[in-house]
């Protein structure tokens, strides 16, 4: 990691964590989400809303209503993507690719013939799944469980079912993708849909239907402080009202959903199985169906079928058959679920290990992956464990360990969990991240103290022994942050850096010594 000035870390992913648009809307079991840090450190900009309202009365004003969107997109288009981090777009781009792959399935799901009875009307209802991208702050809404299945292993987080929609209706909701900012937008306004396409948005077709009976209102909000991920949609009136108190602008009703189906097992026309209890779709839970078969309800709310899923709450990995039956449960998580270092013989005599575990900005478990490498970082500042913890409270980033200037080591994320540290999700779930304090020397170069080098190298050796990674070797079981994504981190410890060779040699020296214990 890097800073522009000592003590202020550069996020691995996106500075949007300090804007309302990037604050996560944490969902409860009933998907009643509330923004945590929505109004912190935000400053207004000239971006405008795409449309100021989407009730039926507004449909005739579509072009005028979206005129402001040209500034919101056009002024950002030329430089926005280059300014964004590679991790952000790797994950956001997957949503766009996934949308293309699933558009036919979505279109087919919208073509349900009108039902003639209450039972058929009930069974034709379609869930819309809600996903959250912790790197960008975007919420994605999709009818396609296949899209959720593709995106969640890549780092998106399932937030159960956002709402249900009818299987038949005369009103369609459309989805668009902005290739410059990585965000998605949804509208029933055909004028808005077509106008946005003229200024660079990609049309992704019909996503779902709006209830002609106006059963359940779905609200739309606009964030005037953000330049991207500017809109949010929710059926929860409490969330709608709360976000307004944080600066979001209410844009009335976007469309109408359908009521939640009756309690019990619900099977969609596409074969998705959901368990509804007390009007709430269950998620991230192992349950039994009517035949007594154990099923895993994913974080998006549907039964996992023919796939492998990791639970974000307990870290277990579930392997499922094509009919949804759990065939294998992998537990415990890869990596130890406690601070083992402080009691390890590998650390004997090395001093106290601080424990200050993050309460956010990391992911539970390792999604079925084992630890294979260690990623080396520098702070670009002489930070303590406590100060880096405070920095990561408002930055969407974290690492497992911090090595301070005096050699003290702190643990901030357990080894069994995934730190947001490499700028690459695939690497994140397979690695341990170590941060190192440093300072600027008289020549204007980043340098580390001898104590930092010694403790960091010993920590690398201890981890290599603990997880049987072999003798420390750069490019094999230890890499620099700059080899995972575009960055200058780890500065002096990077290949060619002034302290690289010393660090690697010291790690190997410690490994040889500790391996004889």
Image (cartoon, rainbow, N blue to C red):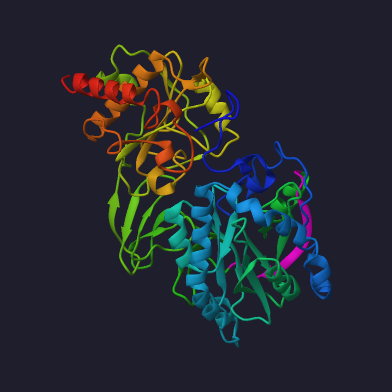
Would you say 417 lies left or right of 36 here? Answer: left
Name the image quarter holding residue 294: bottom left
Extreme-front residue of the structure: 443
Would you say 70 lies left or right of 516 here? Answer: right
Extreme-left residue of the structure: 516
Closer to the camera, 261 or 152? 152
Q: Is residue 411 visible?
A: no
Whole-percent x, y for residue 416 in the image: 36, 38
What residue is shown at x 56% (from left), y 83% (from top)?
111
The magenta region covers: 246-260
Name the image quarter holding residue 436: top left
Residue 380 vertical position relative to residue 129 in the rendered view, above or below: above
| Magenta stretch holds residue 250 | yes
> What is the total number of numbered labels drawn onto the structure image?
0
What residue is shown at x 33% (from left), y 13% (from top)?
350
Whole-percent x, y for residue 54 in the image: 77, 67
In the rendered image, the quadrant that contains the C terminus is top left
| Magenta stretch holds residue 489 | no
Whole-percent x, y for residue 247 in the image: 77, 45
Residue 351 vertical position relative to residue 379 in the rendered view, above or below: above
- Magenta stretch, main secondary structure, is strand
Would you say 512 lies left or right of 339 here? Answer: left
Closer to the camera, 13 or 219? 13
Residue 482 vertical position relative to residue 237 in the rendered view, above or below: above
Name the image quarter holding residue 422: top left
Q: Is residue 23 visible?
A: yes
Whole-percent x, y for residue 164 in the image: 60, 68
């Amino acid at each position: 990691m890097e800073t522009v000035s000592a003590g202020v870390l550069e996020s691995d992913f996106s500075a949007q964590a300090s804007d309302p648009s990037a604050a996560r809307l944490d969902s409860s079991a009933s998907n009643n989400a509330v923004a945590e840090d929505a109004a912190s450190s935000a400053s207004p900009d000239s971006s405008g809303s795409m449309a100021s309202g989407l009730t039926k009365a507004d449909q005739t004003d579509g072009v005028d209503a979206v005129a402001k969107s040209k500034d919101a997109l056009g002024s950002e288009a030329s430089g926005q993507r280059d300014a964004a981090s590679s991790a952000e777009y790797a994950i956001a781009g997957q949503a766009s690719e996934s949308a293309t792959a699933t558009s036919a399935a979505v279109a087919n799901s919208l073509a349900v013939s009108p039902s003639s009875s209450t039972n058929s009307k009930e069974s034709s209802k379609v869930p819309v799944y809600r996903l959250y991208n912790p790197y960008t702050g975007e919420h994605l809404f999709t009818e396609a469980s296949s899209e959720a299945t593709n995106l969640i292993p890549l780092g998106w987080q399932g937030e159960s079912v956002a709402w249900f929609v009818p299987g038949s209706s005369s009103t369609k909701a459309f989805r668009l993708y902005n290739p410059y900012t990585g965000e998605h937008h949804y509208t029933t306004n055909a004028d808005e849909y077509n106008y946005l396409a003229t200024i660079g948005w990609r049309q992704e077709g019909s996503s779902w239907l709006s209830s002609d009976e106006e059963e359940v209102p779905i609200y739309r909000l606009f964030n005037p402080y953000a330049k991207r991920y500017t809109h949010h949609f929710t059926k929860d009136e409490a969330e709608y009202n709360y976000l307004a108190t944080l600066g979001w602008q209410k844009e009335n009703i976007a469309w109408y959903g359908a009521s939640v189906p009756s309690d019990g097992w619900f099977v969609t026309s596409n074969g998705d199985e959901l368990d509804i209890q007390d009007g709430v779709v269950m998620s991230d839970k192992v349950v039994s169906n009517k035949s007594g078969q154990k099923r895993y309800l994913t974080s998006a709310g549907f039964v996992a079928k023919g796939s492998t899923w990791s639970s974000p709450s307990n870290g277990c990995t579930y392997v499922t058959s094509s009919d949804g039956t759990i065939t294998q449960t992998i537990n415990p998580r890869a990596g130890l679920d406690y601070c083992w270092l402080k009691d390890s013989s590998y650390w004997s005599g090395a001093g106290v290990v601080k424990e200050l575990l993050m309460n956010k900005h990391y992911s539970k478990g390792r999604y079925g992956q084992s630890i294979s490498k260690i990623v080396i970082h520098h702070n670009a500042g002489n930070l303590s464990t406590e100060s880096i913890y405070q920095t990561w409270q408002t930055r969407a980033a974290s690492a497992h360990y911090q090595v301070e200037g005096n050699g003290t080591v702190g643990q901030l994320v357990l080894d069994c969990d995934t730190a947001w540290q490499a700028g690459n999700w695939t690497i994140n779930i397979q690695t341990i991240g170590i941060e190192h304090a440093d300072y600027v020397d008289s020549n204007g170069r980043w340098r580390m103290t001898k104590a930092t080098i010694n403790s960091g190298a010993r920590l690398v050796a201890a981890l290599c022994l603990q997880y049987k990674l072999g003798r420390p070797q750069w490019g094999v079981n230890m890499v620099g942050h700059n080899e995972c994504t575009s960055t200058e981190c780890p500065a002096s410890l990077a290949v060619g850096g002034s302290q690289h060779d010393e660090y690697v040699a010291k790690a190997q020296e410690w490994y040889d010594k500790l391996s004889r214990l």
